[in-house]
Amino acid sequence: MIRVLVAEDQSAVRAGLVLILRSAPDIEVAGEAADGEQAVALARELRPDLVLMDIQMPRLDGVAATRQVVAEGLADVLVLTTFDLDEYVFGALRAGASGFLLKNTEAKDLIEGVRTVARGEGLIAPAVTRRLIAEFAAPAKAVRGENAPDPAVLDSLTRREREVLACIGEGLSNAEIAGRLAMAEATVKTHVSRMLGKLGLRSRVQAAVLAQELGV
């Protein structure tokens, strides 16, 4: 059973999300939060598997709340977003969000997105991920200027880890990477874990953005 904490300040939207999630036999809504501070507090109390996090919320926004939840290792975070909030989305990427969904996503895609992140895949719908990267990685890199990633950060990676990083940059799942690189899915997971650790990254989404920025 996947235990989900729903964090959304608009009560009607939150109720709709809860209704959709409860329709899935393998998903349990562990709690509901109306703002970022409450989301962090409930994550500490309930220890859900995943927090479905709205970006724009009162008291503490979704980016700051995501940063706290991820930093404390409380749960994975699946962010609800729109495509007109570039600074918020890139902030959530850097905060360690494990995936993104559009606010107008279909019910079946919401449920599958939760399942995907719960499996540790991180990248949800590849098309959405690629669009996010295309829309936000380049502008954010330009804004960061001197803080843009140094290609030398890849020097610590093995050849296989670089290949896995490139596949993640394309939005491939572990199963798809295993098929492309002719290795067991468990081996892919090991390479992903080691690669994230070496690069100091918190999620596959961060790895995908880095791969795009460095042209891996």
Image: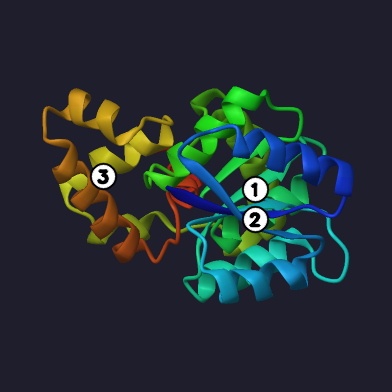
Q: Residue at x 58, y 24 (%)?
A: 108
The answer to whether 173 appears left or right of 10 in the picture is left
Question: In which image quadrant can residue 169 be found?
Answer: top left
Count residues near mark 1 (Cα–Cα under 10 Å), then give few for <14, some for 14-19, many for 20+: many
Q: Amino acid at mark 3?
A: Arg
Contact between labelled residues 1 and 3, with CB atoms less than 8 Å apart: no
Residue where numbered disc 3 is placed: 162
Residue where numbered disc 2 is placed: 92
Residue where numbered disc 1 is placed: 79
Seen from the viewer's position, the closer of residues 136 and 54 is 54
Q: Residue at x 20, y 42 (%)?
A: 188
Question: In which image quadrant can residue 197 be found?
Answer: bottom left
Mark in front: 3 vs 2: 2
Residue at disc 2, secondary structure: helix
Contact between labelled residues 1 and 2, with CB atoms less than 8 Å apart: yes
Residue 101, horizontal then vertical, whole percent: 64, 36
Q: Identify the image quadrant of the C terminus.
A: top left
Q: Is residue 170 above or below residue 81?
A: above
In the rendered structure, which disc, 2 or 1, sits on the residue that comes first in sequence? 1
Seen from the viewer's position, the closer of residues 167 and 174 is 174
Mark in front: 2 vs 1: 1
Residue 86, horizontal then vertical, whole percent: 76, 45
- Specify the farthest residue to the left: 183
Residue at disc 1, secondary structure: strand
In the rendered structure, which disc, 3 or 1, sits on the residue that comes first in sequence? 1
Residue at disc 3, secondary structure: helix
Question: In which image quadrant can residue 147 be found?
Answer: bottom right
